[in-house]
Amino acid sequence: MKYYDENGKEVIIPDNVLEKEVRREGFATVYRYNDDLCFKRYDSGITLNDNFLKTSIYEDLKNIKHFNLVDIKKLLYEDKTYQYMADAYILSYYEEIYNDFLEIPSEYLLYNMEKMLELIKKISAYKIRLHDLKRDNIILTENNIVLINPDRWYYKFKDSEKEIERLNINNIMAMFGGITKESLKANHLDFLIENNLYDYVISSKLFPLTGSKDRAMKVLSKRLDGYKKPIDYVYSMKK
């Protein structure tokens, strides 16, 4: 497979890379490129521009090196003269460690939550709005929660930096709240039924919808105080 980088230099991706699928991400597929890297390409037939990572977004995110943000190494284009948006890209490989979000250590969650909210401030300074936040678009590595798949993030130049930050924080809280509900339904449904508990109530206690970094951290820290894992907090609600 032949592509071009941002300098118009030819880049050849070996065909056997397509035999090493790692995951699917909406309109794209990620493959293992080598021990440290992955190759992501958009599926054929995709024409909606909103699904492709824009070069301008990539250039801004490249200025934000952060362990909670996917490290994209190189954008690839099928046409070396048209570089408004990528046709594929090479990124760091991340290994998923935790299957159940509520089983992660509380210390791990609190640390990553605080650092991620700091990251949101940096992203918002570029007038970038987060979009398509969900469990499939984060990876729980050994040490970090990594936001991947920024393909559908977009600029909101008419809004103030403060307003964009508020909305982005709210989106992050909504994402974690949604992931909490998914975990409860998938892995702890019997406990909920036996104790007449509701997933949306628990998720809102841990991750209330708010655009305030301070309130987000204050609530989560208070809920998890004394509990090794978020699920231990949930189990404390037993009748």
Image: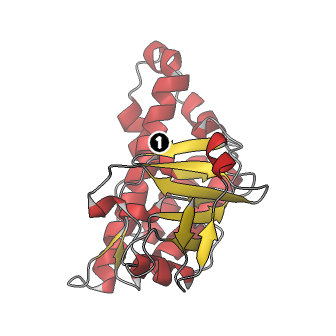
Answer yes or no: is residue 37 visible. yes
Horizontal side of residue 233 vs 50, given as left or right? right
Query: Quick one: SS at disc 1?
Result: helix
Judged from this view, the residue extending furthest toward the right is: 35
For badge 1, the amino acid type reads: Ile
Tally the numbered discs: 1
Depth order, front residue of 31/236? 31
Identify whether 49 is placed above or below 31: below
Mark 1 = which residue? Answer: 179
Q: Residue 32 at x, y = what percent?
A: 68, 50
State the residue at coordinates (66%, 69%): 67
66 relative position to 188: left or right = right
Label 1: how many residues lie within 10 Å, few (<14), some (14-19) or many (20+)? many
Image coords of residue 108 (percent x, y):
69, 54
The answer to which of 173 and 142 lies nearer the viewer is 142
Q: Quadrant of residue 74?
A: bottom right
Which residue is nearer to you in this view: 4 or 223? 4
Q: Is 167 above or below relative to 143?
A: below
Which residue is at a point 43% across and 35% down the rendered structure image? 181
Q: Is residue 144 left or right of residue 196?
A: right
